[in-house]
Amino acid sequence: MDKVAIYARVSTADGKQSYERQIQDLTRIALQHGYTNEQIHVFAEMVSGYQKERPEMIRLLNIVENEPQTYKIIYCTEISRVGRNPKNTREIIDKLTELNVPLWIDSIKQATIESSGKRNIIVSIILQVLMEFADLESEQMKTRMASGKMKRAKEGKTSNSVQPYGYTSDSDGYVIIDEEERIIIEQIFESYQSGIGTRIIAQTLNTMQVPTTHAKRNPTKVYNYNKSIPTIEGNEIKWTDVVVRQILINPIYKGDRKFKDEIIKVEPIVSAEAFDYCNELLKTKNTRNILTKHEYLLKDLIRCGCCGRIYMGRYVLGGDAVYRCTSSLKTRCANRSINISLIETIIYSLILNSDALLKTLENPNEMLNQIKKELKQNEQLLKNEEKELTAKQKQLENLLTTMTLSANPNFSLYTKLENDILTQIDLIKNKISLLKRDIFSKITTVQNFNIEATSRDMIVKAQHNRHELKNIFKQFVQGIVINDLRNGYVLANLTIKINGVAYTNQRLKLFVYANGVRKYGGRNEKTYKYLSALHLINDPTYKNNILTTEIQDIKEEFERLVEQSKDTTGLIPIHKFYNIPKENRLYINECDL
């Protein structure tokens, strides 16, 4: 039984157009020519005519080349459906003619081969003219499409369905930030600024099972990959250092979307300063950084000696850069704040110059285990919050269902309940965002943790790596209590811990020259100065972190130590003032140098 073939194709540029109409029209023609439905084989695909890979056309040609007698005739609606361009179309028609397989072009109601088996000369002439017009029309279409894409881009809309990681499009086609992916983009830039390399960042994302763009948006699509793995499904594509680098150099993340040769503004995910700084690091391949923005090494470790509350970090470029009592925000606690760079530098200096503390770094497993423990806790908290989020979203759905089915719905009550649930959902989402950031940070630290690094070298190298340095501080600092001595100095009572054991009976008293970081009274240079003492004649006492010893008694002890520091006879123990050189200081920002 003779068989015939139908080839139908619609372009991906045609949007919602289907090739079903072509199949129906060509089937009707084949039936009119005396063939039955059982004799008709259909080859249909949705692919741009200018794309090289057209699986169905290739499959049809392979069948015909192997067995030319398979199909009596091939039907298509018009010449533009056959090839990528006039040259390719001519090659296909010539190949079919050589194999004596006629091609029916329905738009001109002619076949390429006459019933006698000879080439149809009239069709050849018509085809040549039509092909030239088809090519001209395609070029005009491409020009119109390019112009349309540029217009959409300038309007802030998408020009295609694929957006860079971190962005998506709304129902009107406008480019907007994907809030879930924003967290990852921000963390990539923050991590790179803090000295974490692209390879470690990629490993961290894979460890966290963060899906890549391909894995998230086209999980089942097959991609050409590399020589060792020719093809791979989207859900198997992992993060690599190359992908992380591409994100770091893509200006869209600072709000500059490149389209053709133009820059179109979109909402940024990171600041222009952060983007430019990361790219400068990429150029120099120097991942050292002074301080990660808004990451406080002594977060939750400093207490107010007046009211017992926690000191929190506050940093404003060109303004405040201090740890201050949280109660001062409402009740105006009288205790003074302390410069972030100053107190962190002093703690760093103490660790750097203490043989007893450095000795514990020869076995840094305690610190690593602590990080892993906190990581596990946060991962469980994240699961709990995600479960709670699902429950709240379900609760919102049930509320809507109840209101819809109600015979007499109370809209005001519904609105109130809806707003309450939405507020709770927003809070949960914020918690999830913070937990994901912290988990990312901890996984990065574990991935980048050098268990072989020991002693002083480890501290020196960590000076510009906030992730490692923060965990070093956590290993050794149990807590600090601050009290203002009202003479330009503050007492920072430091409790040290080693291998998880806090030495509460051997607190180190640090008399910190808080006024030294202020530039006034003719002073041009900042002074990072402190005096330390393990024991005083009248050691300060505390209750719930509140100083119970009179401030005047502490001041007298301090003055005695100052006098001792001036002694040159060597007859009494000397408590020296330490001036920390500029190169050993930690700064909140380069501008503070």
Image (cartoon, rainbow, N blue to C red):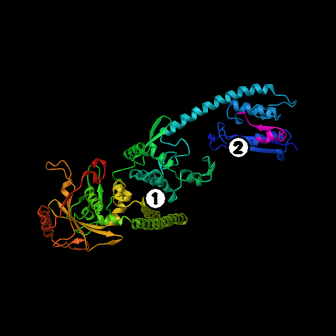
Along the line of sight, the residue nearer the viewer: 110 or 432:
432
Write down the residue under mark 1.
447
Q: Is residue 72 magenta?
A: yes
Is residue 85 shown left or right of residue 408?
right
> Which of marks 1 and 2 precedes in the sequence?
2
Residue 458 spot, x, y in % from top left: 36, 58
Seen from the viewer's position, the closer of residues 425 and 395 is 425
Report the mark closest to the observer, 2 or 1: 1
- Residue 59 drawn at (x, y percent): 74, 43
- In the shown orientation, is residue 167 left or right of residue 344? right
Residue that carries the numbered disc 2 in the rendered image: 55
Name the kind of residue labelled 2 in the image: Pro
Query: Where does the magenta region start and end?
Result: 62-79
Badge 1 marks a residue whose secondary structure is helix
Which label number is shown at residue 42?
none
Rendered position, 25 above or below 588: above
Q: Using a 10 Å C-alpha cutoff, classify the residue at mark 2 as few (fewer than 14 neighbours), some (14 to 19) or many (20 or more).
A: few
- Observer able to see residue 207: yes
Residue at screen point 26% across, 59% down: 346
How far is disc 2 from disc 1 in space, using C-alphas?
A: 44 Å
